[in-house]
Image: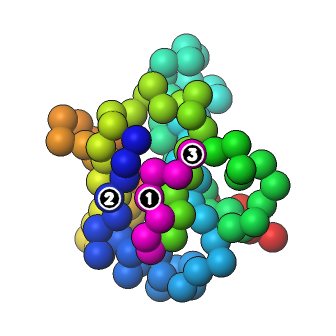
């Protein structure tokens, strides 16, 4: 899986979370959604050296690493784009064929 981060999204990530020292983790959250195929994508901001990140795969490396669990790869297409929508104040995760979320607001999980 490959995720392209647009310049607008990169600028907003830097504004919100700083220039580095963290990673983004893409999660397909199924908690409370009923069936495992019904879920919502989430972005989590985590420490770049957080334990457990080594088992994840990297989908992007610039401007920050964007990681995901290989077991959740089946819920996403191979090529995605993470953009930012200033009018909504949220990020947008999409592929050429669909929008996964137009209102992604990363949750900061750093200590």
Residue at the image position 71 percent from the left and 50 percent from the top: 54
Going from N to C along the chain, the mark reached first, 2 or 1, is 2
Q: Are marks 2 and 1 in contact (CB under 8 Å)?
A: yes
Q: Which residue is mark 2?
A: 4
If the image is split into quadrants, where does the N terminus sit?
top left
Residue at (43, 70) in percent of width and height: 62
What stretch of residues is rendered in magenta?
57-63
Q: Tell me: residue 36, above or below residue 2.
A: above
Name the residue that disc number 3 marks.
Answer: 57
Callout 3–callout 1 Cβ contact below 8 Å: no
For the residues labelled 2 and 1, the Cα–Cα distance comes to 7 Å
Circle 1: element type:
strand
Per the model, the C-alpha gap separating discs 3 and 1 is 9 Å
In which quarter of the view is residue 111 placed? bottom right
Q: Residue at label 1?
A: 60
Residue 84 visible to the viewer: no
């Amino acid at each position: 899986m490959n995720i392209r981060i647009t310049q607008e999204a990169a600028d907003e990530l830097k504004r919100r979370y700083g220039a580095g020292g963290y990673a983004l983790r893409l999660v397909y959250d199924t908690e409370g959604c009923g069936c495992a195929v019904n879920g919502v994508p989430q972005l989590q901001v985590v420490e770049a050296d957080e334990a457990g990140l080594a088992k994840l795969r990297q989908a992007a490396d610039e401007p920050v690493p964007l990681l995901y669990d290989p077991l959740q790869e089946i819920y996403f297409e191979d090529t995605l784009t993470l953009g930012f929508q200033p009018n909504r104040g949220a990020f947008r995760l999409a592929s050429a064929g669909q929008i996964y979320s137009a209102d992604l607001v990363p949750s900061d999980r750093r200590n």
